[in-house]
C-alpha cells in the first residue's frame, strides 16, 4: 500500500522535510539578542542589585584592609601607598586613602563615565572610613602576619571583584586597571601586579624585609583573585 504524495491535512501547514530544521516557534529559543536594547536591559544591574553589591563589596574590602593593618603590613595599589604613609608618618589611613585617590577621578570621568566615577568615589570614602572604624568595633587579640597576608589579600581581592562587577572600583590603580582591561584587553590583575611590584621595592625603606615579604604575598593573592575571576571579555561589569 502506497501513501499519497500530498499532505492529507488540507487545513494545516505541510509537514517539514526530514532534514528540515525548526527555526521558530514556542519551543525554540529567541534569536540572538547580543548587543541589542533587550540584551542591555536583561543584563544591566538594577538599583537594588547595585546597592546590595556595593554594600557587600565595601564590607568585604574594608575588613580585608583592617586585617592588613592589624598585621602591620601593606597591600598593593593606592591603598598600599596610604598604608606606607600611615606607617611612616602616623597619618590617618582613611584620610590618606581618599586624598591619594583624587587625581585618578579625572581619568575615571573621561574614560569610564560619571556612573563609574561616583560609585568609585563612594566606595573609596566608605572603605577608608570603615577600615579606621572596624578596630573599634571588633578588636583582635592575636593575628599572625601570615594570616593577615593570606586572608587580607583574599578579602580585598574579592571586594575589588564585587566593585568591578557593579561598575565601580576601589580607586587609584584599580581605575587605571579596569580602563586598560576594557580598552586594551589586558588583565586587570596583571596591571595591578606590575604596580605592586614597584611599590614593594619602595616598602623596604619603611617596613622590615619580613613584613615586605608578607605584604608581597598578600598582593599576589589579591591579583590572583582578579586574574582567575575577572577575565577580559568574560564579564565587564555592566
Image (spheres, helix red, strand yellow):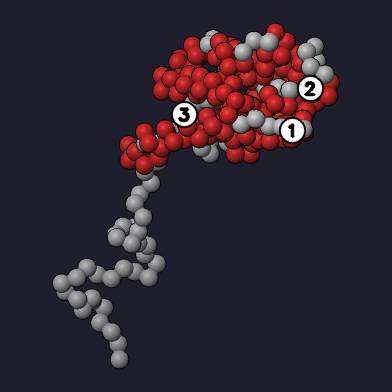
Image quadrant holding the N terminus, namely bottom left
Question: Would you place residue 229 above or below residue 73 in this image?
Answer: below
Which residue is label 2 attached to? 212
Inspect this view and state whether residue 187 appears.
no
Name the residue tied to disc 1: 142
**Position of residue 19 measured from the top left corner of the image (x, y, whole percent):** 39, 67
Q: Secondary structure at mark 1?
A: loop
User: Where residue 120 sits in the image (x, y, percent)?
Assistant: 49, 22
Q: Quadrant of the C terminus?
A: top left
Residue visible at 29% across and 60% down? 26
Give the crowd class for mark 1: few <14, some 14-19, many >=20 residues within 10 Å: few
| Left or right of 24, for residue 110 | right
Q: What residue is at 41 percent from the left and 19 percent from the top?
A: 114
Tell me the mark number nearer the camera, choosing from 3 and 1.
Answer: 1
- C-alpha separation, residue under disc 2 versus residue under disc 1: 20 Å
Image point (62%, 34%), residue name: 155
Q: Does residue 223 appear left or right of residue 42 in this picture? A: right
Q: Is residue 21 left or right of residue 94?
A: left
Residue occupied by mark 3: 167
Compare residues 10 and 32 and report the one nearer the observer: 32
Pick whichever, 147 or 20, lies toward us. Answer: 147
Task: In this rendered view, identify the residue nearer to me: 156 or 114.
Answer: 156
Amino acid at each position: 500500500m502506497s501513501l499519497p504524495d500530498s499532505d492529507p491535512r488540507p487545513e494545516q501547514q505541510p509537514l517539514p522535510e526530514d532534514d528540515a530544521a525548526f527555526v521558530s516557534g514556542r519551543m525554540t529559543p529567541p534569536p540572538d539578542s547580543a548587543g541589542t536594547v533587550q540584551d542591555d536591559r536583561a543584563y544591566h544591574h538594577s538599583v537594588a542589585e547595585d546597592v546590595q553589591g556595593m554594600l557587600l563589596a565595601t564590607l568585604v574590602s574594608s575588613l580585608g584592609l583592617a586585617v592588613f593593618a592589624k598585621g602591620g603590613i601593606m597591600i598593593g595599589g593606592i591603598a598600599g601607598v596610604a598604608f606606607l604613609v600611615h606607617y611612616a608618618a602616623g597619618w590617618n589611613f582613611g584620610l590618606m586613602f581618599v586624598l591619594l585617590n583624587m587625581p585618578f577621578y579625572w581619568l575615571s570621568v573621561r574614560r569610564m563615565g560619571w556612573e563609574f566615577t561616583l560609585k568609585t568615589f563612594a566606595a573609596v570614602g566608605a572603605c577608608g572610613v570603615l577600615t579606621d572604624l572596624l578596630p573599634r568595633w571588633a578588636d583582635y587579640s592575636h593575628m599572625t602576619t601570615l594570616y593577615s597576608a593570606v586572608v587580607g589579600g583574599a578579602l580585598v581581592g574579592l571586594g575589588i571583584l564585587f566593585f568591578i562587577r557593579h561598575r565601580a572600583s576601589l580607586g587609584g590603580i584599580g581605575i587605571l586597571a579596569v580602563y586598560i582591561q576594557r580598552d586594551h584587553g589586558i588583565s586587570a590583575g596583571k596591571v595591578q601586579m606590575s604596580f605592586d611590584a614597584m611599590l614593594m621595592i619602595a616598602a623596604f625603606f619603611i617596613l622590615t624585609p619580613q613584613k615586605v615579604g608578607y605584604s608581597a604575598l598578600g598582593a599576589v593573592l589579591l591579583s590572583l583573585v582578579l586574574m582567575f575571576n575577572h577575565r577580559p571579555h568574560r564579564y565587564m561589569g555592566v
